[in-house]
Image (cartoon, rainbow, N blue to C red):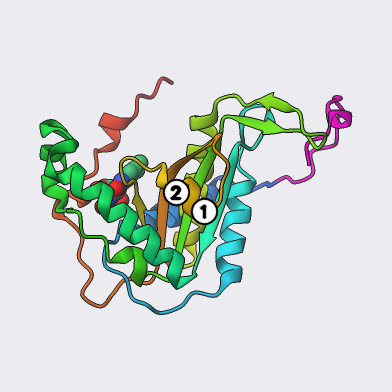
Amino acid sequence: MFSKKNVQYEALSLPDRFDFSEQEMLSRTKAFLDNMQKRHSVRQFDTKPVVEEVIQNAIKAAGSAPSGANHQPWHFVAISNPEMKKKIRLAAEEEEKAFYAGGGGDEWLKALEPIGTDESKPHLEDAPWLIVIFSQRFGIYDDGSKFKNYYVPESVGIATGMLITALHQAGLSMLTHTPNPMRFLNGLCDRPDHEKPTMILTVGHPSTDAVVPAVAKLKKPFSEIATVFN
Ligand SMILES: Cc1cc2nc3c(=O)[nH]c(=O)nc-3n(C[C@H](O)[C@H](O)[C@H](O)COP(=O)(O)O)c2cc1C
């Protein structure tokens, strides 16, 4: 898509515009807030399938995210293949064994205690989809030459947030899972070395006995997360 021919500035009229009343904005933001507060990281998944187009639509929504210089420094690998999911589970559990045996360090392991996680990751096989998110340190023009990407973690973080939001809007549950380290994902997902795996998003329906850690429901109040100057 990126061609050196494509780098001149050209102004287009704003293609989309919304004009909600104050009342509509209030009710829309309130409805959105209520829905977002029903998102929970889930670690126990049902094996019920999810149709691929839902996953594709959510990835397209993520791909519409803002990014530094519009370089879109991300790649999403969506996996429903059972053999690949099994390989990812086995490799992730191998890394996590070392992490939970002390590799993570005392402070980090202590911070994870109230979340109740351990090295066992059955969700990586039970859930119908894994989406592995890669960030790209540089891009490649269609002639094969490289260009630098800017604000890569910020851009990929925003796109990932939009992906999570799109999947949540579809009524699906997720886990943002970050086995440490994650380099094994390049080989398993057939991605080049200059791409950095940032996360596995496990996606599907929660199992009937799914639970959440009580501490995950404690969110900081508005007064702590925001400052307003009028
Ligand atoms: C960058 C990131 C990495 C995370 N890594 C893991 C992980 O490896 N394993 C896990 O069980 N949860 C992981 N989580 C989920 C958090 O534990 C969870 O978001 C937090 O406890 C708050 O719960 P909530 O998502 O239900 O609000 C991660 C979350 C983020 C944002």
Image quarter in which the C terminus is found: top left
Q: Nearer the viewer, residue 118 or 86?
A: 86
Three-letter amino acid code of the residue under disc 2: Leu
Please tell me which residue is depicted at 72% across the width and 45% down the height of the picture: 17
User: In this view, which residue lies farthest toward the top?
Assistant: 229
Q: Which residue is mark 1?
A: 189
Left or right of 14 in this view: 215: left
Q: Residue 166, relative to residue 161: is it above or below?
A: below
Residue 155, how many percent across, how many down? Answer: 54, 34
Please tell me which residue is depicted at 55% across the width and 25% down the height of the picture: 151
Boundaries of the magenta span: 1-17
Residue 150, how many percent across, how many down? Answer: 60, 24
Q: CA distance from mark 2 to mark 1?
A: 6 Å
Q: Residue 174, relative to residue 178: is it above or below?
A: below
Q: How many marks?
A: 2
Q: Which residue is mark 2?
A: 185
Image quarter in which the N terminus is found: top right
Residue 133, how many percent across, how many down? Answer: 49, 47
SS category of the residue bearing label 2:
helix
Left or right of 87 in this view: 140: right
Magenta stretch contains residue 8 = yes
